[in-house]
Image (cartoon, rainbow, N blue to C red):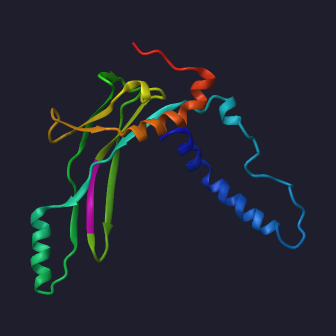
Amino acid sequence: MTPPVIYRIETEATREATKTKNKRTDKNGAVQGTINVLDEFQGWREYVGEYKPVIMLRATPNMGESFWGAFGRGFAAYYGIHTQANYRFKTDFYRMKLFCGEREVMPIQPGKVAHVISESNYFIRAQDATYEGLYTYPADAISNSCGKVRLEIYSERNPEKANTKTLSEKTVVRIENDFAPYFQKYGRSVHP
């Protein structure tokens, strides 16, 4: 979650409302330019300090069907019997670590969020609950100066063994570019 992504999510409804309004007033000689939904109170959130430049990382456990469940469904299908795929979370989130090069970046706020799914249709049945990780880091936690950026994600099933994900150079550059205007204006923080 970077500032441009957050902005896009937060303003989607307003942008759609503006499009609808403009379509309506483009017809029948209506008076133009009486209101621009996007300009009202422009910049007020920045003025009151609502936006804090941070990186939010979300780790959601994968879902899947067990081997024997898929085998049984395949066997039943061979005899013309339809059964739903039974999906479950494969594991539960325990904790996460972010590394800029070899230095571990401490989160501003580590957190877990409940993730409940209850869906049933002709093809699948998924009724399960787990926690996903939602960690907040400083805006400059991921940058080109890190060299390698990696995440270590630990599950409750195996809390000592990390699932490691190295961010691609393209992803790191994208994050760096998203925060560039902020860094140009305010500079970067200094990490120990």
Q: Looking at the picture, how far across and down is residue 191, in whole percent?
A: 42, 16
84 vs 132, left or right, is left
Q: At x 17% / y 35%, what residue is drawn? A: 159
Q: At x 83% / y 72%, what residue is drawn? A: 27
In the image, is residue 14 above or below residue 79? above
Q: Looking at the picture, how far across and down is residue 43, in whole percent?
A: 71, 36
Marker count (numbered): 0
Q: Looking at the picture, how far across and down is residue 89, in whole percent?
A: 23, 54
Extreme-bottom residue of the structure: 80
Residue 126: in magenta span: yes
- Quarter of the image for the C terminus: give it: top left
136 vs 124, left or right, is right
Classify residue 128 by image quadrant: bottom left
Residue 88: in magenta span: no
Q: At x 36% / y 40%, what residue is drawn? A: 168
Q: At x 19% / y 40%, what residue is drawn? A: 156
Q: Nearer the viewer, residue 64 or 149?
A: 149
**What secondary structure is the stretch in magenta mostly built from?**
strand
Classify residue 19 by image quadrant: bottom right
Q: Looking at the picture, how far across and down is residue 63, in whole percent?
A: 25, 56
In the image, is residue 59 above or below residue 49? below
Question: In this picture, which residue range is highlighted in magenta?
Answer: 125-130
Classify residue 71 by image quadrant: bottom left
